[in-house]
Image (cartoon, rainbow, N blue to C red):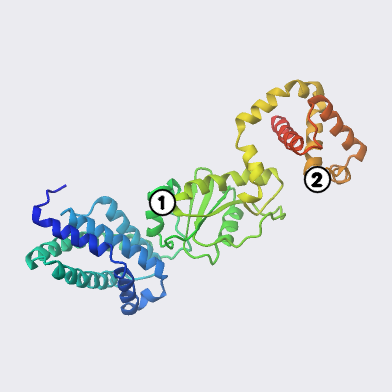
Amino acid sequence: MPTRPRDWEPVVDLIERVLADDDLLPAVVAAVRSHVEESATLPVSDITGHTRVLLTAAGRAVAARRAPTEAELTVVEQLAVNRARQGIPIDVVLGSVRISERAIWARTRELAEAAGIPADTLLDARELYDDWADAVRTRLIRAHRETPRAHRPWDRDAESMRRLLEGGSAAALTAAELGFAAGAGLWVLVTRPDDTASTAAVRRLADGTGPGLAATVGDTLVAVLSSPPTFRPSSTDHRSPVVGIAGPVAAEELGVAHRLAVAAVPAAEASGLSGPVHISDVAPIAALLSRADLAAALTAHHRAAQEELGATAEAVAQTVRAWLEADREASVVARTRFIHENTVRNRVQRFAAVTGIDPHSTFGGITAWWLCRAWTADG
């Protein structure tokens, strides 16, 4: 980092005062929206988020007497890409930046005069800013030009998604770059990208929710939305693919929400659910299925019982599991599995006898369901 002369400290103090001015940012956003017609259709949070990021980056660069870093230029590129995809021409983007600059420097001159900072020192700061701004404008123009002109309903930027799912400050900054409202709750959707139905299901849930991002992460399709998805929990439409949902959370917690949404998918499938399923609807099952170590210990403990049942073990396990999922109604299981009610009762009794588990009790039922699922998975 370049050395900073002693007489530069007042400029650093001035920059900190400008960045801390609560009235400055709303005034800048209002000026942009009133003077640039195309910006009036954008959410205030969108303009505010990008203006705040650029203002902070510029202030830090001038204070340190340096050029923009590659990280700052990456943020600039994202702004250009967003505006290109929103159909906003580059001259409008640059015009908005110029209006912001005028408002910011007008306020800076007021504070500098009150602080007694010499005009030549302020001029040096402005020249440093102009150098920084030239590099920023160059990157803005290039990124805007290279962005495909066809508008897409959401961005499939895997790198942005990776930063969001990291959580923490990286996610917060990326959320601001993407135009998500500061402090707003975010939602994570996860599904298996087996066919076009999965993508279509996520798109339906995202319809009309505002800014969003979708990308393939590993073997799943992940979407992050800035508004609640339009869904009915615990759908029984078996033609719909499962979409695991978690949220709302702050941007910093998106990593945790992603893990919960991922866990909701197998939990929903194990419960016979389909369509959109929030993690809160299947939390107990998700908790069980996430502990493969405990499932292995449970299976090993009852290995002798499984061997005693022999060839009938899988049929017994399937019947007991179906009986538990049918709220212990033998008649329901008999109809769906085409067996006699007495056969259902006999298999439940046989399971209890060989395992020592009472499936009629609350925790015994949980243990029985978990063990039966493990047995059928093994089979």
Describe residue 164's horizontal placement relative to residue 2 as left or right: right
**Secondary element at tag 2:** loop
Is 26 above or below relative to 342?
below
Please name the residue that numbered disc 1 is placed on: 171
Of residues 85 and 78, which is closer to you in this image? 78
Of residues 37 and 57, which is closer to you in this image? 57
Q: Amino acid at mark 2?
A: Ala
Ranked by sequence position, the earlier of labels 2 and 1 is: 1
Describe residue 213's horizontal placement relative to residue 270 as left or right: left
Say if residue 234 shows up in the picture.
yes
Question: Measured from the top left, where is residue 279 in percent x and y?
Answer: 61, 49
Describe residue 95's horizontal placement relative to residue 264 as left or right: left
Say if residue 242 shows up in the picture.
no
In which quarter of the view is residue 151 placed? bottom left
**Secondary element at tag 1:** helix
Please name the residue that numbered disc 2 is placed on: 326
Q: Amino acid at mark 1?
A: Ala
Of residues 94 and 264, which is closer to you in this image? 264
Question: Measured from the top left, where is residue 358 in percent x and y?
Answer: 80, 32
Q: Residue at x 21, y 61 (%)?
A: 15
Q: Residue at x 52, y 47 (%)?
A: 258
